[in-house]
């Protein structure tokens, strides 16, 4: 056995092994369906932890061991063909599942962002500047009014116009041609016309 292996085993005995009662209690939360054994989960976690080549970089051994137990429980659940309702409910209670968006969700989000960028560029110049200062740079309507030399009321009207246009543009992709910004028409006139329809 190499000195590295001896040091790793000593670290495991000192840092991880004393966590066994806590890890067993934690593993029981994942084993309420009766198909998994909490001791098996903990022992599998111990095997993974002691085999970890980067053990020196682990800043919080207790958190690492708990995460390993949870990951093994998730892996076991994924491998099953049929899930019991209690198993799913228990995992939802424990929480903390990986919520990283998948490739499809990432693609959809990028497409929505592209559509929003296009909608913003279609806004009239002053409306676009107000909308960008508020939504991108988080300036208050008062700050925007001072910066652009407008009244707060005008800034708020531009914000409403920009929000309405962008939400209509993104909310109904097939109806893009029907959404139009009419700079010549007053906001009140547009509102009144929309109310009559």
Image: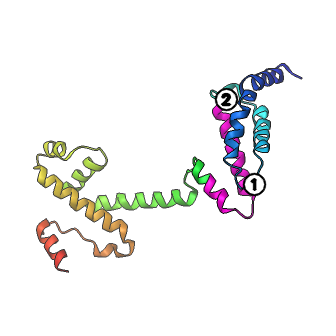
In the image, residue 104 sits, relative to residue 190, either above or below, namely above
Hey, which residue is sitting farthest right in the picture?
1
189 displayed left or right of 102: left
Can residue 98 be seen here? The reply is: no
Q: Residue at x 16, y 44 (%)?
A: 142
Q: Which residue is mark 2?
A: 61
SS of the residue under disc 1: loop
Q: Quadrant of residue 124?
A: bottom left
Image spot of residue 103 (x, y percent)? 57, 57
SS of the residue under disc 2: helix
Front one among 187 and 95 = 95
Q: Which residues are magenta?
A: 62-90
In the image, residue 197 sits, relative to residue 100, either above or below, namely below
In the image, residue 174 sits, relative to residue 134, either above or below, namely below
Image quadrant occupied by the N terminus: top right
23 displayed left or right of 176: right
In the image, residue 80 sits, relative to residue 142, either above or below, namely below
At label 2, counting other C-alpha atoms closer than 10 Å, the crowd grade (few under 14, some 14-19, many 20 or more) is some
Q: Earlier in the sequence, mark 2 or mark 1?
A: 1
Image spot of residue 47 (x, y percent)? 80, 37
Image spot of residue 18 (x, y percent)? 73, 27
State the mark number for residue 134: none
- Measured Cα–Cα span from mark 2 to mark 1: 28 Å
Q: Residue at x 16, y 65 (%)?
A: 183
Q: Residue at x 23, y 51 (%)?
A: 129
Q: Which residue is mark 1?
A: 34
Q: Main secondary structure of the magenta part?
A: helix
């Amino acid at each position: 056995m190499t000195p590295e292996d001896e040091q790793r085993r000593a670290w495991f005995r000192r840092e991880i092994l004393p966590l066994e009662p806590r890890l067993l209690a934690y593993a029981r939360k994942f084993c309420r369906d009766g198909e998994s054994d909490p001791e098996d989960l903990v022992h599998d976690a111990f095997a993974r932890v002691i085999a970890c080549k980067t053990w020196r970089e682990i800043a919080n051994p207790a958190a690492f061991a708990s995460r390993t137990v949870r990951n093994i429980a998730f892996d076991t659940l994924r491998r099953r063909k049929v899930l019991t309702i209690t198993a799913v409910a228990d995992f939802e209670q424990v929480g903390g599942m990986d919520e990283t968006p998948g490739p499809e969700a990432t693609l959809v989000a990028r497409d929505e962002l592209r559509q929003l960028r296009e909608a913003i560029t279609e806004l009239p110049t002053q409306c676009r500047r107000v909308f960008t200062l508020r939504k991108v740079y988080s300036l208050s309507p008062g700050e925007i009014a001072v910066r652009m030399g407008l009244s707060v009321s005008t800034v708020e009207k531009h914000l409403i116009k920009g929000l309405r246009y962008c939400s209509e543009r993104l909310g109904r992709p097939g109806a893009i041609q029907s959404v139009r910004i009419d700079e010549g028409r007053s906001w009140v006139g547009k509102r009144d016309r929309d109310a009559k329809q």
